Amino acid sequence: MNGSQGHVERAQTIAQLFWQLAGARGDAVMMRQKELGIWQSYSWNAVRETVSDIAAGLIELGLQPGEVISILSNTRREWLWADLGGLAAGAVVSGVYPTDSASQLEYLCDDSRSVYLFVEDEEQLDKYLTVRERLPGMRRVIVFDMKGLEDFEDPQVMSLDRLCELGRARRQRHPDEVAQRLQSRGREDLAILVYTSGTTGRPKGAMLSNANLLAAIGALDRFLPRLHDAERVSFLPMCHVSERIIGTYYAMLGGARMNFVERPETVFENIQEIQPHLFGGVPRIWEKLYSRVTTAVSEAAPFQQWAYRKAIAWGMAAARHRERGEPVPWPVRARAWLAHVLVLDNVRRMMGLHRTRVAITGAAPISPDLLRWYLALGIELDELWGMSELAGAAACNPPGRARIGSVGVPMPDMELRISPEGELQVRGPQVFMGYLNLPDKTAETFDDGWLRTGDVGRCDPDGYFYITDRMKDIIITAGGKNITPSEWENQLKFSPYVTDAVVIGDKRPYLTCLVMIDQENVERWAQERNIPFSDFRSLTRNPEVIRLIGEEIEKVNQEFARVEQIKQFRLIEQRLTAEDEEMTPTMKLKRKLVSQKYAELIESMYAAKAA
């Protein structure tokens, strides 16, 4: 048993695991945060002291084991400190997307029955203040960054520094209390909530126990190669299951230093500075890195453009042999080596991936051609697959043996199967406890002990799994955000001017929408304003009508997070009835048929945004 697996075996909770690791690693650097242009380093001992202060501060405020705290913030050091501090105090910790609206924050805090809320700054605090009258159970709000709030006084609101002061004072009075709280929770107890959109309705809180989390990071540690003295960049939302479990808990276990980016806008510059050994991202990140390269090449001198095209072609030739699992012939290997020495290594350095040895993509499908491009650069991008309900990854391509287009093989101790209906199903120690407050939904999610994933899949003779379709209509954007389109569509249909709508966005960088207007109401609206039209098509093409629907869409957008908002829309110019194939007998648009029939219209929305 290696050292890290020993820690997993001995720990009963994630908080206990952190305490063990901090005790073993002491003054070694655990994390860095870029602040005012300078990378600030924090040792394991220093982080444990801060986490202890936060835990003791929460105890001083009255937190009891099993109560829920929520965190609303961008990814930064304080997010992890609050997370570990809450867990150490015996709390259940729930994350909220920093882009969520005030109404979404209200729902999540109410559903989870959160009693303490950590927020990043004044902007996030304002969301809470907007809805706090409807959250009577919230006791205190703790703010990470008090900029702009120096003169703000509210008995319910305090700074993180003040919480830590309370904690230090309590630790002096009760020096053993935090250590005792560490023992208040066990492996089978609920540890974190990860809210995920279902096929219909509001987000559901996936309940993950300490056992789920320890099994997940233990499997990753056994599956992925160990990298000595590794650096990684932390930038994905920490409320998302991948960054929370793979990006932080697994990084802690393996000893990889976490480097928290300065701001979301500086991600790519920070990656260049860190040159991480271990790098994971959603497809949108890998696409943006590729775009930065192609843009730079297009602006380069003619000779540099020629050199890049030649080098990438030589790299691609070698990649094709690797993809087929064949030995690379020495002439091809020699040209690829020359391409890397002269050109491609510089490309990787420009991207920030010169030292990358383990590269992971997940949360949404990725283009096989993009995987081949990275392979030509010398980066094997290993696609993994998982869900919030599975505490992260349940399958992953083995490094060195990846198969492009597949999501890999089952993680250690996990079983995958294809049901008679073609659904990918899973069982194992990472499978979640169920949905918070939703026993019926939980029961529907299981089939004789197997988790129903909603994905259609297949398995090849060598045990590699492939996702071929979605059994239902959840949209996963290129940025990895799970979105339930019906929730947005149903909101828009409250408008008197809209009969139906279809949200588009699966594997896309943003959401768009096709709208079917209510002919009677829109005609009346146009007549009252002396807006000319001759038929239904001319009505849908009128700029004033288009502006009207745009205003209705913006009203709905305000109720959703930015990543869930519609960026472009088009009006369906044909008046549809129940006799049309795109409509159900109850006058609802059929998503698949609409997407097929109006494919050209849909593409125009993405072309318009790109332009």
Image (cartoon, helix red, strand yellow):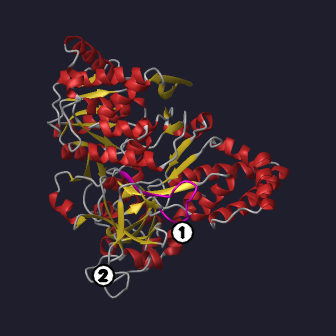
Left of 477 or right of it: where is 72? left
Task: Please say whether residue 417 is visible from this viewpoint.
Answer: yes
Q: Main secondary structure of the magenta part?
A: loop
- Three-letter amino acid code of the residue under disc 1: Glu
Work out how far the residue at label 2 is from the one at label 1, CA to CA, in angstroms.
24 Å
Residue 214 position within the rendered picture, expressed as x and y whole percent measured from the top left: 33, 43
Which residue type carries mark 2? Thr
- Residue at 15% across / 25% down in the picture? 62
Q: Quadrant of the C terminus?
A: bottom right
* Residue placed most toward the observer, 526 or 279: 279
- In percent of width and height, residue 287 lies at 58, 54
Question: Residue 411 is drawn in which quadrant?
Answer: bottom left
**Which quadrant would the N terminus be assigned to in this image?**
top left
**Extreme residue in the bottom direction:** 579
Tell me if 419 is positioned left or right of 406 in this view. Answer: left
In this view, the residue farthest toward the right is 303
410 and 132: which one is in front? 410
Residue at x 40% of width, y 49% of height:
219
Q: Nearer the viewer, residue 582 or 57?
A: 57
Relative to 589, does residue 188 appear above or below in the rendering?
above
Image location of residue 74, percent across then percent down: 41, 37
Tag on residue 190?
A: none
What are the residue bounds of the magenta stretch?
392-407
Determine which of the numbered discs, if any, sits on residue 603 in the image.
1
Q: Secondary structure at mark 2?
A: loop
Residue 110 among magenta residues: no
Residue under the image location 51 percent in, 56 percent down: 398
Identify the residue position indicated by label 2 in the image.
584
Horizontal arrangement in the rendering, residue 360 relative to residue 333 (left or right): left
Q: Secondary structure at mark 1?
A: helix
